[in-house]
Amino acid sequence: MFLEKNLSALNSSVFSELSLKIVSYLQGNEKSQLSKNGGGLAYEEGEKEQLFSEIKTQSLRYPFICLFGIGDGELIKRLIPSYSLIIVLEENLDFFISAFSRFDFSEDFKQGRVIFVDTSSEKLELYLTMLFSTKPYYQYLSLFELFMNGQYYQHFYLEKAKAVHRLCESAIFTTLSTLGVWARDILFSVYENFLFNVPLMLENIPIARLIEERKNKFENAIVISAGPSLSKQLPLLKKVQENAVLFCADGALNIVLEQGIEPDYILNTDISDFAKAFLHEIPAKSLIINGYSTHPKTLKSLKGKNLSVVLGTKDGVCQYNFFKDFGFIELGGNVSHFAYALALELGFKNIIMLGQDLSLDFNGDSHAKGYAYGENFETEADIEYFKIKAYGGKGEVTTHITWDYYRKDLERLFLLNKNKATFINSTEGGAFIKFSKELSFEESAKLLTNKKPNFSLTKPITHNKAKKILSKFNTKVKADLRKSQGMLEGAKELLNALNTILESHKTLPLNFLEKVKKMIDEFDGKLEEDEFLNDGKLEEDEFLNDGKLGFVFYKKGELICEVLKAKIEDESLFHLYYINHYKEWLGFFIENLERKIQILNKGLENSLRE
């Protein structure tokens, strides 16, 4: 009865794959598995009532829960009013069909109260990362647990549920890594580098104009990374270099130059001046493309070269209309990701990958021979290593958590752009990377039949225009400083008020505590509405790509989670506990906002000197 409505709601969302899969299954002539096994899923007497009570008790006041198994749909329908979001994970199409036929989930789905995820989808990890990155749920990830929808799933799907649980934990780690929970110093460095780099960016090649001049002019590109497998590919690369546009990660530059290979594009995103060791020699024909996060000393050492500084596509701090000539491209977590993203923007259809190991080789080397810091540079680092599937699906290789994060981020990029380009992994070593086509370099080189064109050099914008843009930017920074000072004062006033209340040692009535909680909620509302604090930090997945205070707002959620995990039933005690934890977060917020203000002041001083 409700099946068509539910499928229509699914079909109009990013989860349309499930709807199409169900429709295709129904149009087939196979007899339903539910009919074959006499109905399939069944609950014991009183089991659903017990499940309902247990889940509600174990997740008291939780904003969201994850449930393995759709069951017959009834338990989920009953639970929906108690949560802002329920994520339902299921792989059995017959169970989806049965539940969708019995209950109308269409409005719940459209309003985001329930999400149905097909655990057999190749996009599963992408879906999970997307869901866990969504406002406000990223703040409450420490509450995650996977509830089972009955004994049937415990009996028949336990191993699958364990695998899904591990994948959820992986997606949560990816989300928190992007948020910068463990790397706030790095995020502040990115922000500081950006502010210092703006004047030099305006003096050099605007990337948007370069893309406009060169887009779709050639089909074949090679992205050269510095993994240990690169060494064996160099002789053939030298032979075919005139038949492909070469994008070279900075760490691979001296390696290819020693073989007489000159890249068309050299890319760098390092926030420290670490990369200066790679960039002693820049061929006259090469363009060096830097992320806005590149260390200012590195950029200054490249002055006079064919230089471009590129703004990130998802960082709200960059998203000003007056900067449109200088962005916007997805930089990703590492320099090779940036290279693939730029190749996509330039319209290449075949993107060949070399040296993209993201693992140690069988000799224990982390980089190609000739790498500036030594081929065992990361082998000797104090990092925990583990095994993952190897290139070609044969055996395993050794990787670490950062490389594995890069791999997953590349898989997301490749999946989302699979209709724009073919990503051909000719590394012939290292980790298996999903959504890429594995071919030996000898095979992929057969695609390279045409000579690449010669491009004229894109000109910088005029000095007068650059001056006007810099003036607009300085005006924006000054406005941000005024707003941040006002927000800082408000935060300090609230912190003082909460300290006074909590240190009074009086018995505080519930109605008073509720008024204090309302005062906190009003301050939170101002934070969400404030333009300065919402330059990418509080708006869903844009928030996760900010380089300033994203981790601060995660910290708030983490502290609130401590309150929720306590499962306090008494309302007065719950409010008191909540207020105390919010007070702790305010101190953390003030500390980091003051640091951001300090960076803004330094950036403005530098910009005004230029």
Image (spheres, grey):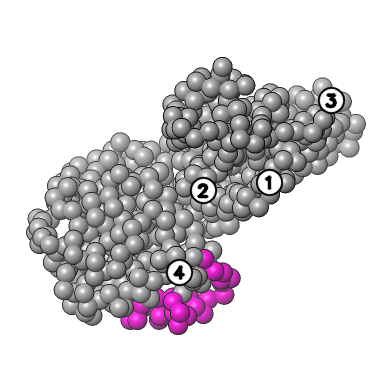
Residue that label 1 marks? 156
Residue that label 3 marks? 510
SS label for mark 4: loop
Specify few, some or many for label 3: CA neighbours under 10 Å numbering under 14, 14-19, or 20 or more. Answer: some
Residue 26 in the magenta stretch? The answer is no
User: Could you tell me if residue 68 is visible in this image?
Assistant: yes
User: Counting residues from the N terminus, which is met first, the one under dot 2 or under dot 3?
Assistant: 2
Q: Amino acid at mark 1?
A: Phe
Q: Amino acid at mark 4?
A: Lys
Q: CA distance from mark 4 to mark 2?
A: 22 Å
Mark nearer the viewer, 4 or 3: 4
- Looking at the picture, tell me which residue is in the foreground, 291 or 344: 344
Asked whether the residues under the numbered discs 4 and 1 touch, taking CB atoms below 8 Å apart as contact, a structural biologist would say no
Asked whether the residues under the numbered discs 3 and 1 touch, taking CB atoms below 8 Å apart as contact, a structural biologist would say no
Query: Residue 152 placed where, x, y %?
Result: 72, 40
Specify few, some or many for label 4: CA neighbours under 10 Å numbering under 14, 14-19, or 20 or more. Answer: few
Q: Which residues are magenta?
A: 361-388
At 89% from the left edge and 37% from the top edge, which residue is drawn? 505
At 24% from the left edge and 64% from the top edge, which residue is drawn? 444
Dot label at residue 125:
2
Determine the image quadrant of residue 337. Answer: bottom left
- Does residue 102 appear to the left or right of 248 in the view shown? right
Question: Please, what is the dominant secondary structure of the magenta stretch?
Answer: loop
Dot label at residue 394:
4
- Does residue 584 appear to the left or right of 272 in the view shown? right
User: Counting residues from the N terminus, which is met first, the one under dot 1 or under dot 2?
Assistant: 2
Determine the image quadrant of residue 316. Answer: top left
Q: CA distance from mark 4 to mark 1?
A: 29 Å
Query: Residue 554 placed where, x, y %?
Result: 61, 45
Mark nearer the viewer, 2 or 3: 2
